[in-house]
Image (cartoon, grey):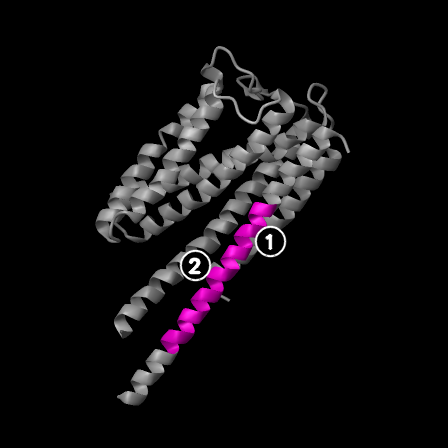
Amino acid sequence: MSLRNNRAVLLAAAASVLLVAGLALALLWAPQDADQGFSQRIFYVHVPIALTAYACFAWGAWKALRLLWTREPRYDLESYTAVHMGVIFGILTLVTGSIWAKISWGVWWTWSERQLTLFLVLFLFYCAYFMLRFSVESGPRRANLSAVYALFGVVLIPVSFLAIRLAERFIHPVVFTRDGPQMSGSMFLVFCICLAAMLALFASLYTNELAGKRLDARLRELREALE
Amino acid sequence: MTTSEKYVTGAYLVVLAVVLLYVVLYAFKLSRLERQIAELTELAQRRRKAA
């Protein structure tokens, strides 16, 4: 078994163990929130998924920067795969956030919240990445255009993240402040395990998806050489 | 089961469903790649026989 396969298996095993542990702790062990009650437990999936989506887009932008810097074509596929994963985690962020909003605020969505709207803008921006990518013939031009687009999108990440802190009127809860996390030690521990689980899940999916896309590209080259 | 418990369970199940859907789609992709490899192997063998 190659080193790459070993890494993929290790990442998948780590993600599975952390996910089972995180979800079990979140549902069975974490203390009940005095304010929101049981519904606060969505926090342990929603926030780690949202942070992982930001991490995916940032990783995609980093790979895009490496492509523009070094001109190595492999970074194009790596950036594309990271954005692909970011969109999946983005969908999950929006769905789990909507469910939490329905319990807490009584609505599935509210346009008055900057945090929600900016996350939606970020998500739609990266959805449009695919339209751009597939409207251009594959080659260096497509790689460069995609890389520049992925880099522009990364600017929206700190804006989206800080929007809630800059808002004057908000109903979206602020948990992480300058004074540290506003929760008990056990809640923070469960949150960290869930965050590690989501990051491990991203790493595992990214490794497998990238291997699949590379194999796909090599097969296409082989077919062109044989036909 | 209270309403909030139903919603929380729903949120966790959505995450699980998306991960499972991804695994299923990936399995389809793997079977497509295997089929393509088989086709290319056959093509290469035909070429070798013809040469």
Q: Residue furthest left?
A: A141
B34 in magenta? yes
Is B6 situated left or right of A127 in this image? Answer: right
Q: Which residue is mark 2?
A: A212
Which chain is indicated by disc 2?
A
Q: Name the residue: 56% across, 30% down.
A: A97
Is A94 displayed left or right of A211 in the figure?
A: right
**Residue shown at the point (58%, 20%) measured from the top left:** A173
The residue tagged 1 is A13
Residue found at x 67% / y 46% = A20
What range is drawn magenta here? B17-41
Q: Residues within 10 Å of mark 2 (few under 14, many from 20)?
A: some
Q: Residue A218 — which label?
A: none
Horizontally, is A8 left or right of A28 in the view?
left
Percent x, y of residue A103: 65, 25
Work out whether mark 2 precedes mark 1 in sequence or the reverse, and give the earlier one. 1
Q: Nearer the viewer, residue A131 or A87?
A: A131
What secondary structure is the magenta-colored segment mainly? helix
Q: Position of residue A4 (x, y in %)?
A: 46, 59
Query: Is residue A19 found inside the magenta-colored segment of the image?
Result: no
Q: Is residue A99 above or below residue B21?
A: above
Residue A100 visible in the shown view: yes
Q: How many marks?
A: 2
Q: Residue B9: image x %, image y %?
A: 68, 37
Q: Amino acid at mark 2?
A: Gly
Asked if A188 appears above or below B44 in the picture, the reply is above
Nearest to the eye among marks 2 and 1: give it: 2
Q: Depth check: B10 or A216 in front?
A: B10
The x and y percentages for residue A12 are: 56, 53
If the image is split into quadrants, where does the N terminus of chain B sit?
top right
